[in-house]
Image (cartoon, helix red, strand yellow):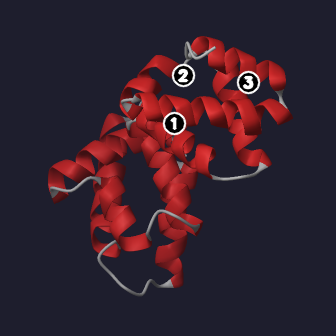
Amino acid sequence: RTESLNGNKSKRDEMINNDVTFLGEILTQVHWHKDDQSRFIDIFSKRSFEYLGVLCQEYEEINDVSLIEACDNSLGNEYGVGFIINCILMNITDKHRYYQKLWKKGMKTEGHKYIMFWRVIMDRMDIDLDEILKLNDKSDVDRYDFKHFIDTRLHQQDSAAADLILKICKLS
C-alpha cells in the first residue's frame, strides 16, 4: 500500500515509474492476461488518491495523453471497470467536473441513486455548487429544466432537500 511509501520517496518514484510504464503498455493492448488485469485493478484499488494524482501527472507527461483519456479509449467510461476508473480519476483530477457529470446524469436518469447524489451534494461542505453551476454554464432554459426536475422528481422523494437545493441555486 502506498501509505507505507510516504517516507520513502525513491521507492515511491520507482513504483510510479513502473506503474506508468505498465499502464502505457496495457492500455494499448486489446487482450489482457489475467495477471495484467489483476495488476491494473490493484493500481486503482490499493493506491492512495494522492499517489494516483501523481500517477496521472506522470502518465500525461510521458505519454502526451491524460490517464483518464487513455483509460476511456481502452475501456470506455459508461459501464463496468471503465466507469469506475473514470469516476476515480475524475474525482482526483477535476472534482467539480466529476460532480457536474453526475449532476447531468442525475437529471436524466430515474432512480434512488441520483436522489442520494443530490442529498450528498447538500450534505458535503467541500462541494461548491456555484462551481458546478458555472461549469454547466446555465442558460434560462437549463435553469427551467433544472427547477422542473427538482420540483417534480426530487421533491417527491425529499422535499426538504429539494427546497434547500432550489434556495442555494437561487431558483426559489
Is residue 117 placed above or below 66 in the rendered structure? above
Disc 2: CA contacts within 10 A as few (<14), some (14-19) or many (>=20): some
Disc 3: CA contacts within 10 A as few (<14), some (14-19) or many (>=20): many
In the rendered structure, which amino acid carries the disc numbered 2?
Ile
Which residue matches tag 2?
127
In the rendered structure, which amino acid carries the disc numbered 1?
Tyr
Is residue 93 placed above or below 14 in the rendered structure? above
Q: Nearer the viewer's eye, disc 1 or disc 3?
A: 3
Q: Which mark is residue 162?
A: 3
Q: Residue at x 31, y 58 (%)?
A: 69
User: CB under 8 Å between callouts 1 and 3?
Assistant: no
| 38, 140: nearer the viewer | 140
User: CB under 8 Å between callouts 1 and 2?
Assistant: yes
Q: Nearer the viewer's eye, disc 3 or disc 2?
A: 3
Disc nearer the start of the sequence (1/3)? 1
Give how far apart the Cα atoms at labels 3 and 2 are.
17 Å
Image quadrant in which the C terminus is located: top right
Q: At which x and y percent is residue 131? A: 42, 22
| 30, 26: nearer the viewer | 30
Q: Residue at x 73, y 28 (%)?
A: 119
